[in-house]
Amino acid sequence: MDTVRAAVIGVGNIGYFHAKNIFENKVPGMTLAALCDIDEEKLVKAGVELPGVLTYCDYRELLTAHVADAVIIATPHYLHPPIATGALDLRYHVLIEKPAGVYAGAVREMISAAERSGRVFGIMFNQRKNPLFRLAREIVKSGRLGEPKRLCWIITNWYRTQHYYNSSSWRATWRGEGGGVLLNQAPHNLDLLQWIFGMPSALRADCRVGRHHNIEVEDEAAIYCEYDSGASAVFITSTGEFPGTNRLEISGDLGKLVLEEGRLKWWRLRVPEREFCFASDKDFDKIPFDYEEVVPEEKDTGHLGILAEFAGAILNGTELTAPGEEGINQLFISNAAYLSSWQGGRRVALPPDDDEFYAELRKHISRSAQKKIDANTAGRDELCPERWQTNW
């Protein structure tokens, strides 16, 4: 195989964005073979804008036609696992949009299908391609920050208007989307939290439903994570603040990292804090340190980088930055956060119990309202690529 023929399933904002990039030859080793969407009007429009590409209204018809080697799934969240599982069982390579799904039980089945298939399976955690996050991870994992102590991430610049939530019937509903800011915007950040700092062992959370918008899911959340090592993490996010903040601070026995405004600030202690604490003969002493700021020259390749890796993995065995099976880690955190919040902020061990979470989710789905969409709010957001990049 010289070129990967890709089919995009779901041609809303992000799916169309991927399809257009592939169609315009921005992804080496990949061509656009087909599009699929249940919205015929949306599909026809995309077909006109991307001429010569096959179109399907039913993903099962697309899969059985075998006109592609790989599928990129950009549908509403609940559909990611069943479509991916069907494609993997038919030996397609699969790249899913985030999140991996809504509840971990369905994602486990998808991961099992990927293992059986032997196909390439990836997830669109494009912020793993950001050079600052990659550097932070390398510093923490290499031990250069010492024993991890604390992570604090304030990520409140995911601002959304009511118009955004009104633009689609599936958005901001338990029945259609399966959650709010933790499942739509913040999966990137929850993934990076565990990718850089490790998976917590337990957490407590407060998820505020409709605090800033007329929606039935959370648009604000605060999570406190515990680690077996004694480290902790605090995660605060919202879609109702402007201009908001994106500040990631990580402290360890050998210093501190702060990622903010497109730069990484690094305080490197010359003596480990724990050693200094018990060796000093002063009440208010200061540990000598070196300070460095990093503004990366390396480009953040984002979505195109993930797509190019996906094609390279199929053609040449290139290693994926975001393997599909790792998508469940972010979901463990958000599932546990919902459980904790629904149950009065109780401490929830990770991974949470699949059956317990699914039972609680079904209660929320049963109360989920059928949302009507004003035709004036529907349609593709032509400016949406801006919101998918790392926003400092």
Image (cartoon, rainbow, N blue to C red):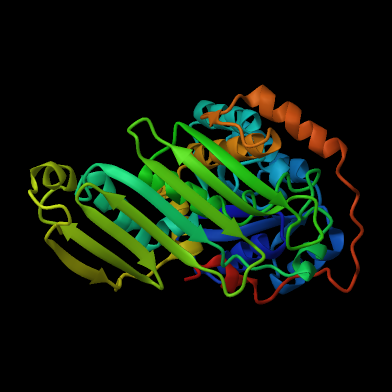
Please tell me in which quadrant of the rendered image residue 2 appears.
bottom left
Relative placement, left or right, of 244 versus 168 is left
Residue 131 in view (yes/no): no
Q: In this view, does 116 lie to the left or right of 50?
A: left
Residue at 59 percent across and 54 percent down: it is 6
Question: Does residue 14 show up?
Answer: yes
Q: Where is residue 126 in the image (x, y as percent from the top left)?
A: 48, 57
| Viewer-side residue, 180 vs 150 | 150
Instruction: Specify the farthest residue to the front.
Output: 283
Q: Where is residue 361 in the image (x, y as percent from the top left)?
A: 74, 34
Observer-nearest of 379 and 363: 363
Q: Where is residue 148 in the image (x, y as percent from the top left)?
A: 29, 44
Q: Is residue 1 above or below residue 384?
A: above
Query: Where residue 37 sits: x, y (%)?
Result: 77, 54
Residue 167 appears in which quarter of the rendering?
A: bottom right
| Nearest the eye: 132 or 118 | 132
Residue depicted at 37% across the width and 64% down the height? 259
In this image, 199 relative to 363: left or right? left
Please name whichever residue, 114 or 317, is drawn nearer the observer in this view of the structure: 114
Give the mark count. 0
